[in-house]
Image (cartoon, helix red, strand yellow):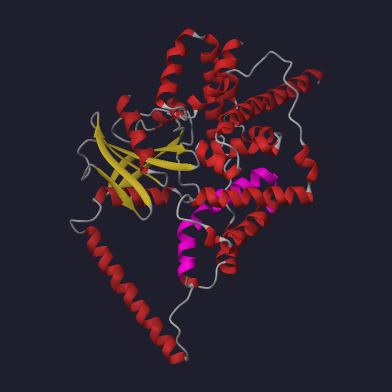
Amino acid sequence: MLESQERERFELCILPHLDAAFNLARWLLRDRQDAEDVAQESMLRAYRFFGTFRAGDGRAWLLQIVRNSCYDWLRKNRPAELQDELHEESLVSKELSPEDLALLNQDRGRLAEALQSLPANFREFLVLRELEGCSYKEIAAITSRPIGSVMSGLARAREQLREALLTKEKVRKEVRRGM
Amino acid sequence: MACREQWGDRLHGYLDGELDAAGAAEFERHLPSCDECSAALRTEHALQTTLARAQLYERAPASLRRTVEREILPARRTAAVTGAYWKWLAIAAMALFAISSGFLAANLFHGRGGAPEVAVAAVDAHLRSLQQGHLADVPSTDQHTVKPWFDGRVDFAPKVVDFAAQGFPLMGGRLDVLNGKLVAALVYGRRKHIVNLFVTPEGSTAFVSGMGERQGYRWLAWQAGGFDYVAVTDASATDLTELRALIEKE
């Protein structure tokens, strides 16, 4: 294929998903600068392997490359992060109520912090579903998991997120009480 | 507890609209008789809404876009001409072509076959609204704040409803101008996308119902309950028809 034709096709199928690529890298790596580097490297890989892209879902194809690049990067630079264990099953019987959650609406910082406290392999479910709006089928393709495990993964991830928000809540209340 | 085990994960499939029709119907039959599942669904819904509202999505910085376009992609090829004379000639020819094709496109667009005037104006207004700081005059997710804000600013009372639970969180409102007429503009979020909904009393602008695409944006124009609506977004056309259905149900 002529180089200019290939560029045109890449611009049409892949380049529109640059925001998606950056956003996924940003939440997997928890750092904007690292995300920019890895997203750039992913775009380079995507362009190099563009010949293997068959017409179809350009976003899922690109995000799969981004995800792999992010995990490669983490393995090399911050391997400890990949050993993050799930929080212990909650012993608290209290759950966040819909009203508590509604109050968090405007608190981007707190939600971001809670999301970032989740292990990467749970965080990615929430980023792909709630931020990127991917279907279960797309999430399965991007994360190379069987489609049946996406639903249970999301269920666990949401539970984890609520728990992380609750833990923050508890800490806050205790701090206030101590003062 | 037994219920959680039976339904736990499938509740998420239901929440995400990923169960097949039979599965969803089965869950809906179960729901009214089960407080535990009803409460759990409410909580998951609230979490989803909160995440949608928090605007966690982070777009690619301009520096990344520049690097990709300049360094990763090969340079755009123009005709292989050598010598300054041929180069200038080529540029002049290209400019002439661009001008004439732009002229042709402009003519076609305002002609009978193009998008209706109101859609052209709405897409322009949508683009204007995306400039920094222009999205909302009253940035509020509370319909009881946005609705009264329009009192005294427009001579009609637009319906303002927050559809956060249905995936269209209200983000604010502002005044806008379509074809020289003052209109109410409501801003909704749709995942990472923005939807502008322009509202005027029926018959006050040159209005044509329909849907289409212009400059990469989808538009949908319809009439309901004495109002003319035009919605514009970079999300999908299905998102717009979903929003229309919600408004018509109100």
Let me know if residue A32 appears in the view: no
Q: Is residue B16 above or below residue A43?
A: above
Name the spot of residue B149 as percent of width and height, x first: 41, 31
What is the x, y in percent for residue A111?
Answer: 64, 33
Residue drawn at the location 47% of the way across and 51% of the way down: B131
Q: Could you tell me residue B209's position as x and y percent?
A: 23, 42
Q: In the current view of this chain or complex, which residue is farthest to the top?
A: B33
Residue B155, position as x, y percentages in the image: 28, 34
Q: Give the quadrant of the C terminus of chain B.
A: top left
| Residue A81 can be seen in this image | yes
The structure residue drawn at horizontal position 66% and vertical position 34%, both measured from the top left corner, is: A122
A25, B60: nearer the viewer: A25
Chief SS of the magenta region: helix
Query: In the rendered view, does A137 fall on the left or right side of B151?
Result: right
The residue sitting at 20% across, 45% down in the picture is B206
Along the line of sight, the residue nearer the viewer: A65 or A173 = A65
Of the 4 image quadrants, the one containing the N terminus of chain B is top right
Q: What residue span does the magenta drawing correspond to?
A: A5-33
Q: Quadrant of residue A88?
A: top right
Q: Is residue B29 left or right of residue B101?
A: right
Q: Residue furthest left?
A: B112
Q: Nearer the viewer, residue A57 or B202?
A: A57
Circle count: 0
Question: Is B190 a magenta residue?
Answer: no
Q: Residue at x 52, y 22 (%)?
A: B11
Specify whether B19 is left or right of A145: left
